Image (cartoon, rainbow, N blue to C red):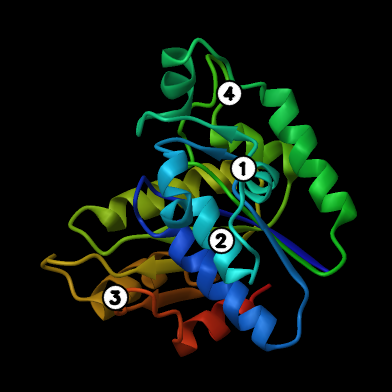
Amino acid sequence: MTAVFITSTGTDIGKTFVARGLVRVLRKNGRKVEALKPVVSGFEPREAEGSDPGLLLAALGAEVTDEAIAGVAPWRFAAPVSPHIAARREGREIDFAGVVEFSRRAVAQHTDALLIEGAGGIMVPLDGTHTVLDWMSALELPVILVAGSYLGAISHTLSALDVLARRGLKVAAVVVSETAGNALELDEMTAAIAQFAPALAVIGIPRLPSGTLDHPAFGRIAEQL
């Protein structure tokens, strides 16, 4: 039985893309898969099917309904900013203990494969004192770290790995999701990160046509779980 936390070096790097690809390959391999994104900002109910929770539900083969969205992402906020700021703008506050308990309950109840996707990067605040890193530390699940291939991504990725190591979190894989229009080639970025993290699986995924999740790299990621 597998449970893993998917995080990233920043926002809009490709966490949901990687999660959807993993869901697809695991289901194709006959696994029963559950996927959650408990905290999400920038959520527009009228565009639920294209939201991160909606895309996860579609990958799972589930209907995108209000009830299903609430089950996958209980903490949803409209503003496309840090969750704690998005919550504040709505006169709300994220219950960090509640997020941890929701996640722990899902881990305890899952029967095969469970993917929990975080919000933004590893140091994104959830409230005035807790970050996504604190959330991951509370769960103690293996981590998939998603990085980009933009200029500066090597430093961001190695910094993130250092922080995760200091918290004693196991990194199952580093996934480099190709960034469009950047000077660094995907293979260059993947090799550079692997040189400084020789003990880890560093796997590159090229940009794929919209809606496409069929690439051998997702199978390689699944093998690390």
Q: 91 or 192: nearer the eye?
A: 91
| Residue marked by disc 4 | 130
Mark found first going from the N terminus, 2 or 4: 2
Give the percent coordinates (x, y) of residue 87: 49, 20
* Amino acid on which disc 2 is placed: Leu
Using the image, tell me which numbered label, if any, was put on residue 207: 3
Quarter holding the C terminus is bottom right
Q: 49 or 56: nearer the eye?
A: 49
Give the percent coordinates (x, y) of residue 95: 67, 21
* Amino acid on which disc 4 is placed: His
* Disc 1 versus disc 3: nearer the observer: 1
Left or right: 127 as drawn, with respect to 105: left
Q: Is residue 121 visible?
A: no
Give the percent coordinates (x, y) of residue 213: 45, 79
Mark found first going from the N terminus, 2 or 1: 2
| Residue marked by disc 2 | 56
